[in-house]
Image (cartoon, helix red, strand yellow):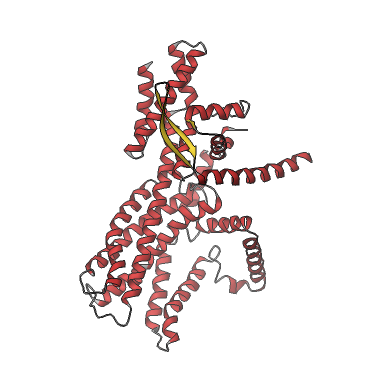
Amino acid sequence: MRNAVTKYLGELNSALQVSAWRQRRIVAEVSDHLLELIADEQERGADPASAVERAMERFGVPAELAAEFNADAARHGMNRASWALAGCATAAFAAAGLSLHPGTTARPWPSGSAFSIVMQLWVQVPVTCGAIALFLAVVAPWLRGTPLAKRPAVLAGRSLALASVLLLPVGVVAAGNLATGMSFAERLPLAVVAVGTPVAAIWGLYAASRASWLGHRADGEDVLDVIAAVGAALADRWVLAGRVHRLAGDTWQTARTRAPWLTSWLDLRRHPWRAAATTSVAAGLALTAPDLLVGDPDFLAAAIEALAVYACFAALGGLLGLRGERPSDMRTRVEVATTT
Amino acid sequence: MSQDAVRGHLDGLVLAVLASGPAHGYALIELLRERSGGFFELPEGSVYPALHRLERAGLVESGWSEAGGRRRRVYDLTARGRRAVTQRRREWRSFAAAVDAIWQGV
């Protein structure tokens, strides 16, 4: 009897991929419950051997039970990494904003242009990746009331991995600028980025490596589908959101019927490249808007911003599920459907 | 109803059972079976991932208790958990009433 229970607990223990503390706790709880089940079966008249067998049957397959715990641990890890990376990216943005202050006298490390490229241009990519991860792993499951699973989990994992890797140069530049004579207010967000980035990156990469436990890359929705589902969930939850959702939907349908060519420049699902061009131009204009207000627009910086946004969309849009399905994903989706 | 369909509601069912008082895993699955008139025949282990999930979400808290020479981990609702029970009960009643209204026309 003891051997069978030990074997069952050993199988559960080796299949669990959670922290050592949680692993010990799960095994202790399962062990207690199994012993009660065995006693229960014996009280009903079963002999010791069949009581053990029936208790384990009632409890369930160890691998399936461990898989549920592992999936929850993966979700928790993605949640934590998303918040950490989003926090570091926000601090990096704040640091870049403060360093643009006209009164600053410090000379940035390694040089003014390198500081600007990393802290103002490059940082936008991990910020976007972090925002996608936070949306998929935290915001959407909360608003929809469903756990993170399938393709959105894979996309969140990819976003976390990219954000983790791409934030590292930002962390290095932030650390290098801690001793350049900047004011305390400027150094504070830099210190947060320098210390927080390595921790957030480790959490992000670890969580990304576990994303495949939650689903297959070709099994489920892409980011645009999740945005649509969140819109519908909000509409169900609040009356005002429902009205806004209906109004936006009706307006979009009317615009598509009356001016299909014009709306194609905003339709990310059907015309991703055109919509990306619109977004790039909007990003460039947004960057130069403060300068326009003071009558000194920097059109070169706006053009660089627009080109960078478009280049990033071309390079990462498919990987992050922003550009619809790739042919390889569609093939795999058919394979998944035919094998299940 | 399939086991998968029950699993989709397991977190809510666990909260509902704990609303009547603290319980350990074994008692909880017994209560689920008893209060459903034997309808919910889930693998007994399936209740633990739900309990750990609810504890992480701050809806349930746990602690060791000793009774009859045995140490057991006992689960109880937190204040947030109690609010979640009220909300889920309201949502479930509206949902069940709507489904029932449709079936009555058949």
Q: Is A28 located above or below residue A218 in the figure?
A: above
Q: Which image quarter is the N terminus of chain A in?
A: top left
Residue in the image at 45% along x and 28% along y: A61
Q: Is A259 located above or below residue B103 in the figure?
A: below
**Image quarter of residue A193:** bottom left
Residue in the image at 31% along x and 73% along y: A117
Count the labels in the image: 0
Coordinates of residue A330 in the picture (x, y in percent): 50, 51
Q: Nearer the viewer, residue A258 or B64?
A: B64
Residue in the image at 43% along x and 81% along y: A290
Q: Nearer the viewer, residue A227 or A140?
A: A140
Which residue is outermost to the right? B105
Coordinates of residue A229 in the picture (x, y in percent): 57, 55
Residue A258 visible from this viewpoint: yes
Left or right position of A239 against A89:
right
Residue in the image at 75% along x and 43% along y: B101
Q: Is A310 located above or below residue A45 in the figure?
A: below
Coordinates of residue B106 in the picture (x, y in percent): 78, 39
Coordinates of residue B36 in the picture (x, y in percent): 62, 29
Residue A326 visible from this viewpoint: no
**Image quarter of residue A63:** top left
Left or right position of A255 against A170:
right
Q: Nearer the viewer, residue A275 or A41?
A: A41
Left or right position of A78 against A182:
right
Q: Is B47 located above or below residue A222 in the figure?
A: above
